[in-house]
Image (cartoon, coloured by chain):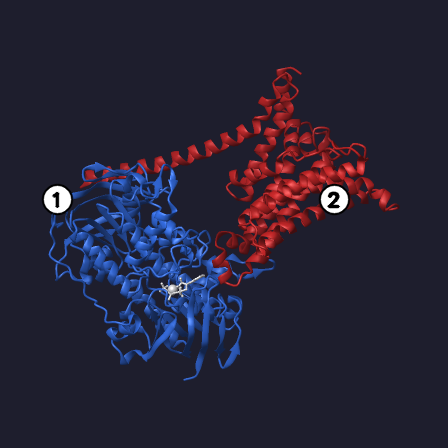
Amino acid sequence: MTFETVLASIFSAAFIATIIRASTPIILPAMGGLISELAGVINIALEGIMLTAAFFGVVVGALGPEWLPGLPVWVYPWLGALVGVLAGLILTLIIAFFHLELGADVILAALAINILASGGTVFIMFALTGDKGSTSTLASPAMPSIIIPFVGSIPVVGQIFNGENLTGYNIITYAAFLSVALVWLFLYRTRLGTHLRAVGENPVAAASVGIDVKRVQYIALLMSGFLAALGGINLSMGYLTLFQTNMTAGRGYIALAAVFLGNRNPLGTLIAALIFGAAGALEAQLGTLNIPSQLITMIPPIVTIAALVIYNVRRQAQMAANARKFQEKMESEHKVV
Amino acid sequence: MPQLVDMRNIIKVYPNGVVANRDVNFSVERGEIHALVGENGAGKSTLMKIVYGLEQPTSGSIIFNGRPVKLQSPHQAIDFGIGMVHQNFMLIPSFTIAQNIVLGHEPVKGRLLDTKAAIRITEQLAQEYGLDVDPTAKVEATPVGMRQRVEILKTLYRGADLLILDEPTAVLTPQETDDLFDAVRRLVAQGKTVIFITHKLIEVKEISDRVTVMRHGEVTGRVQTAEVSEEDIARMMVGRDVLFRIEKPRQQRGEVVVQVKGLSYVSPTGRPLLRDVSFQIHRGEILGIAGVEGNGQTQLAEVLSGLQPPTTGEATIGGQSVLGRGPRHVRQAGVAHIPEDRLTNGVALEADIADNLVVDRYYRSPFARRGAMSLRQVRRHAEQLMQKFDIRAAGAEALMGSLSGGNMQKVIIAREFSADPVLLIAAQPTRGVDIGASEFVRRQLVEERNKGKAVLLISADLAELLTLADRIAVLYKGEIVALFRSRPDLSEEELGLYMLGLKRQLPEQRE
Ligand SMILES: Nc1ncnc2c1ncn2[C@@H]1O[C@H](COP(=O)(O)OP(=O)(O)OP(=O)(O)O)[C@@H](O)[C@H]1O
Ligand SMILES: [Mg+2]
């Protein structure tokens, strides 16, 4: 591909579709990370949970017909997703138990889970398929896609709403965008969400008004595990329908970066996740050019740094403007006196 | 009168081995205002946390309303109608006042929060009990006096009949304290019962019906307030006569060592908090700063100690310009700082006493040698200071967070005084400190002055300023509106007029 064709593809409707697709497995774990962070029990095991869910989703989706024959075909992907999510929740429960019951450090507990997940998935995959690289020998199903009717024939709009090939987005992509609104509603408009934020900000104060801090933190961790697991399912049962060793490729950590870059709120986190998604999409497009891949993989981190710098420069400019305004006011007051 | 709470033979041993309550009997009658007093670390807060279900007694029983009860969580205590306003505020800074008041028992419409109802409830409560608050303001942006009222409203919203107020006046100005007392009297008139912890014996005399005195974890006296004098109570607390008067020899004023010129500070959100503040301090002088809380005192201390860069203006210590290069630079130029918010800026709660005492000097000899710290020196240093400043704790390696409020303050004072500064900034140094220790702190401040140090004393306690300071400046809305030489006929009321912005001096009247 030439540079021009790449440029053209970046400024096309199809590219927006790619961004939406690439953002999905960042938005979901980011929402999970946000919830856990706001509850004061940041879950850095998003990566491992995604990986585990992705793996079990594929395995159960593919081997389901063998283990439980006779069900309608559409059931198996859902069964896979269910088991994948359950696996993610069990891992989260382990973190929650070690941290909340036994007093282990939440970061260390999660770190252990990440290591366990990256090795454990490969181990079981090898036992099941004899392959250490991917499950390409298994015929695994995809979660259904949703095609929005009527818009397909409209140029541009059709591609934005139904993907570049007009095959629709995976149902989990819809779940991801819906989750942003739901998480917002949960955090700011429900009692439990309010308790969650209170616990994260001042646990002693929350306890003193009778809020059960431990219970709230259990719930927050489990919600983060659930959302991360959905992100994992999206990786292995969406656009791709197989599991590859370490296929999350750091998305669980990028999701955490999105939480902080997004100023620890749902909308900001969504925007940050979209920026990262765009960087990923760009990375994929430029990969077709004859540019060293090391340079291209630097795009997402550079985008992060650039975003942080811009944010801080703007804040400082704001502060300087405030100070200037004040000085001018003082000077004019003195002239009057 | 029937007893509302009756605590019998309460013993509390903390996991670290500190015995905070030794066989305490304590009871409160329905409808009374009961003062609980005692030195720092006497076990007052612990006893109250037991009533509120935050701590479990090691042994002993509690009878509430005639029935034996087990209070295992604040939740249960709240259900019994017990409410507590803690010594350290228990609020969520980023939430609004209404959100804080209903936290844990939020009104809902369907499954979602009913924000309007929360605001309405707050307004109603505020009006019913005469405690004025702004329901939609964020707690982090409200002055301490209002936070105090929020805490009280919080307990009332939960239906408290028994209110425990743990040192509620420590952070209040005289005016705010009067308002609080009016509110407390109204509450009692409406059938509530109040337990009131304080270190100010004047307040005990003014508001309480009965007093229980604690010392070293034991109850040493229980009397009708009307039958005793402040001196009697002090004697019961400390076990000796307490001198309320501080000897202050005539000032030997030296040359000017601190020059502050045109200092302004604008907050990141654009609010001017200090406006063109200029003053000088001489060697051997205590300059007092009076003002209603939130008029720039905090920012003045933070800017002068290097914690915040000023927006404009400068300060020199002995002719050397000190600001804008961070706190260590300021400290090395000879500034020591007792911060107002001791929990956030004064100590590291999760470090031990010894470490807290060397945080400003660990990098120098004798604590550091060739880049390594001498733990023996750190320990020796801590033990010396603990003895000199009478810090009561399990030992030098006791965690800061396990100390009583007053002992925490003593650790800070020990560190700052022992730094041998040129300028000592003391912000609310006796807040929450018991009478014995306050006397000690005040005497030390005067001694530093006599040794030729410059002292900047920021205090909400006007009586303290009038006894200690050689000159008093009044801050109003970030501006110095008056500067007086301390003299016998200067009254609290006179200062009050300037503090409230009702009067201001012309520049040439400044003394
Ligand atoms: N959580 C804790 N763990 C260990 N020791 C504690 C804890 N809380 C308090 N203590 C210790 O128990 C003793 C009593 O403390 P408490 O806070 O009850 O005193 P207080 O009378 O309220 O003092 P102050 O007037 O300074 O607030 C002190 O020696 C204190 O160091
Ligand atoms: Mg106390």
Against B65, residue B295 (above or below) is above
Which residue occupies 65% across, 25% down? A284
Going by the image, does B250 lie left or right of A41?
Answer: left
Going by the image, does B202 lie left or right of B7?
Answer: left
Secondary structure beneath dot 1 equals: loop
Residue A237 drawn at (x, y percent): 74, 37
* Image chain in red: A
Q: Residues within 10 Å of mark 1 (few under 14, many from 20)?
A: few
Per the image, the residue denoted by label 2 is A81
Q: Residues within 10 Å of mark 2 (few under 14, many from 20)?
A: many
Three-letter amino acid code at the position of disc 2: Ala
**Residue A125 visible in the snapshot:** yes
Mark 2–mark 1 distance (CA, rounded to whole Å): 79 Å
Ligand 1 quarter of the rendering: bottom left
Residue lying at the far front in this picture: please name it. Answer: B376
Q: Which sits in the foreground, B21 or A121?
A: B21
Residue A2 drawn at (x, y percent): 64, 15
Against A211, residue B217 (above or below) is below
Going by the image, does B302 lie left or right of A98?
Answer: left
**Residue A172 visible in the snapshot:** no
Residue lying at the far right in this picture: please name it. Answer: A70
Q: Which sits in the foreground, A234 or B380?
A: B380
* Image chain in blue: B
Residue B471 drawn at (x, y percent): 16, 53
Q: Which mark is residue B255?
A: 1
Residue A322 drawn at (x, y percent): 34, 38
Question: Label 1: chain?
Answer: B
> Is disc 2's CB within 8 Å of ligand 1?
no
Instruction: Indicate the quadrant where residue A294 lies.
Output: top right
